[in-house]
Image: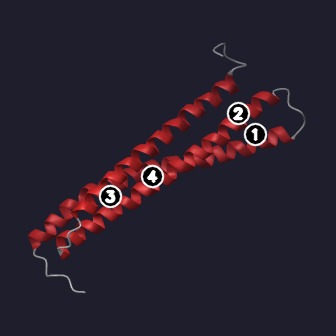
Amino acid sequence: MTFPQADSETLARVLQFAISPAVLVSAVGLLMMSATTRLGRAIDRCRSLGRELGGPAPQNRAELLEQLEITHKRAHWLQHCITLFGTSLFLSCLMVFLLFLQILAGWPVGGLVVAAFALDVLALMAGVACFLRDLSLGLLALDIELSPHLKTR
């Protein structure tokens, strides 16, 4: 398979179209890094709570169990979040590839580019929703931990 010789104007157009998905890849990468860090912290917290519950009978066993349940849910929400962000990254890369095929090889893949973009944005939106759910669960677990010290609960 041979590609037609591209002139500088065509190459400039290709690079121009590839910039938006590249910026999206960078932004989603930062979101994914944040989510993976949060997942690691949630896993560490689950292990810590498990050790506390496995030791001598703690006086606040019910609160620890509630925190463990919430933190476990957070880990699963973050797993979904990371999967959706990864899907978004894949679709962004697919868009760039399809744009190259369309512009350089002349393949009629415009509909696939639009579909990849739509799915990319949907995956990103769903990932952000999962991320926000993790944040609210994290605050709920914090409320449980601090409830003996605060009069808000």
Q: CA distance from mark 1 to mark 2?
A: 8 Å
Crowd band around label 4 with a 10 angstrom C-alpha radius: few (<14), some (14–19), many (20+): many
Q: Percent x, y for residue 14?
A: 18, 66
Q: CA distance from mark 4 to mark 1?
A: 28 Å
Sequence-wise, the earlier of marks 1 and 3 is 1
Amino acid at dot 1: Leu
Badge 3 marks a residue whose secondary structure is helix
Q: Percent x, y for residue 47?
A: 74, 46
Residue of label 2: 67
Q: Nearer the viewer, mark 3 or mark 2?
A: 3
Residue of label 4: 85
Rendering colour mode: secondary structure
Amino acid at dot 2: Gln
Q: Is residue 93 left or right of residue 37?
A: left
Crowd band around label 3 with a 10 angstrom C-alpha radius: few (<14), some (14–19), many (20+): many
Amino acid at dot 3: Ala
Q: Nearer the viewer, mark 4 or mark 1?
A: 4
Residue 49 marker: 1
Q: CA distance from mark 1 to mark 3?
A: 42 Å
Which of these two is toward me, 111 or 69?
Answer: 111
Q: Nearer the viewer, mark 3 or mark 4?
A: 3
Crowd band around label 1 with a 10 angstrom C-alpha radius: few (<14), some (14–19), many (20+): some
Q: Is residue 103 left or right of residue 151?
A: left
Residue of label 3: 116
Q: Are marks 1 and 2 in contact (CB under 8 Å)?
A: yes
Q: Are marks 3 and 2 in contact (CB under 8 Å)?
A: no
